[in-house]
């Protein structure tokens, strides 16, 4: 099972909007070097909403190629049309991903019955492990623990990324879904508490730019070392909030560019590059987190 510190990887792009595969390869090497436990390719932070399916699959496939078996790659396979999610899942099944992460269908607001039917259809199209993903702040639908529990019996649905920031759900999910079901935080600000309450890992935005520290925090929390986890996490808390001064992944992509991790901070419309009034805020948060800016 994949656990620990997982990066929701950005998708680097050139100034003309094409994917920058050279920077993508450097990012994969960076995370292997820094000890990151797994990579999510083309999730929300990877701009899945603005990558057409063929490009989406290509980016995931190249990430797997660059990883070369040294770090697990989880491919994003979410869509708000079940047929599209199934098609994407079948394509990703052929590129070597270790698992897939499927966000709840967004905008069309399915009922709990619809969510269960959607995820069962997606899971039935592959043998590869599936991770559910609940982020109501983006999707306008909240998949409650009781709905998640209805999917535990599907053999290749192995866990859920819970991004509400409500850590009380850890206990409820564990009660309903059992000890073998993987629980991943999708909220950096509450990740430490999520792990200390029994979570298995964190799929993180901040991990793009502070992977070594984030890995150390996750390891400490998973080991139950509350004091050590807090000592690592507290200096990063300002960074966590500032990385959402505008819609993710606008700030983290700008930060990665300022660190020299990627050649260009380009982001696809309808998102635009970080507004100037946020530059100072983010630079200050990066300095306080002891991040070197080039």
Image (cartoon, rainbow, N blue to C red):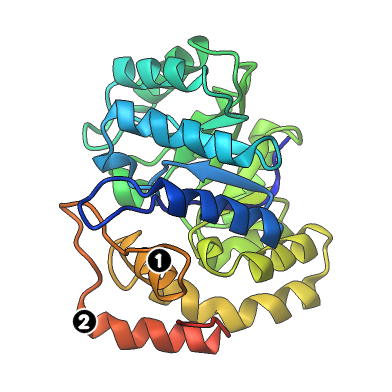
Q: Is residue 72 left or right of residue 126?
A: right
Q: Is residue 27 left or right of residue 138?
A: right
Relative image position of residue 135 (x, y in whole percent): 40, 47
- Which label sits on residue 276? 2
The answer to whether residue 40 is above or below residue 117 is below
The answer to whether residue 276 is above or below residue 13 is below
Visible in this render: residue 43? yes
Q: Quadrant of the N terminus?
A: top right
141 and 244: which is toward the camera? 244
Mark 2 / mark 1, whichever is N-terminal = 1
Give the residue displayed 71% in from the left and 41% down from the top: 70
61 and 102: which is toward the camera? 61
Q: Quadrant of the C terminus?
A: bottom left
* Quarter of image, res 156: top right
Q: Secondary structure at mark 1?
A: helix
Q: Residue furthest left?
A: 270
Count how many numbered circles sit on residues in the image: 2
Q: Residue furthest top?
A: 124
Q: Which residue is mark 1?
A: 252
Q: CA distance from mark 2 to mark 1?
A: 14 Å
Q: Secondary structure at mark 2?
A: helix
Give the residue displayed 57% in from the left and 40% down from the top: 66
Visible in this render: residue 163? no
The answer to whether residue 116 is above or below residue 108 is above
């Amino acid at each position: 099972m994949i656990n620990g510190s997982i990066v929701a990887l950005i998708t680097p792009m050139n100034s003309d909007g094409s994917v920058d595969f050279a920077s993508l390869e450097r990012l994969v090497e960076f995370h292997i070097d820094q000890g990151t436990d797994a990579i999510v390719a083309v999730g929300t932070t990877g701009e899945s909403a603005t990558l057409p399916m063929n490009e989406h699959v290509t980016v995931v496939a190249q990430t797997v190629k660059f990883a070369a078996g040294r770090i697990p790659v989880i491919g994003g396979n979410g869509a708000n049309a079940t047929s599209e999610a199934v098609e994407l899942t079948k394509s990703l099944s052929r590129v070597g991903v270790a698992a897939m992460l499927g966000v709840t269908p967004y905008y069309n607001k399915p009922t709990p019955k619809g969510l269960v039917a959607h995820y069962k259809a997606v899971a039935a199209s592959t043998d590869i492990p599936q991770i559910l993903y609940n982020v109501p702040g983006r999707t306008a639908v909240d998949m409650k623990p009781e709905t998640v529990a209805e999917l535990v019996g599907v053999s290749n649905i192995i866990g859920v990324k819970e991004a509400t920031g409500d850590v009380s759900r850890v206990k409820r999910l564990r009660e309903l879904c059992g000890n073998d079901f993987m629980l991943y935080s999708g909220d950096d600000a509450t990740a430490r508490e999520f792990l200390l309450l029994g979570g298995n890992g964190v799929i993180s935005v901040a991990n793009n730019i502070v992977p070594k520290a984030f890995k150390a925090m996750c390891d400490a929390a998973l080991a139950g070392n509350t004091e050590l986890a807090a000592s690592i996490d507290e200096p990063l808390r300002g960074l966590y909030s500032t990385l959402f001064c505008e819609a993710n992944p606008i700030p983290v992509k700008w930060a990665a560019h300022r660190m020299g991790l990627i050649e260009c901070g380009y982001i696809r419309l309808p998102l635009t590059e970080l507004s100037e009034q946020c530059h100072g805020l983010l630079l200050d948060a990066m300095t306080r987190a002891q991040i070197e800016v080039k």
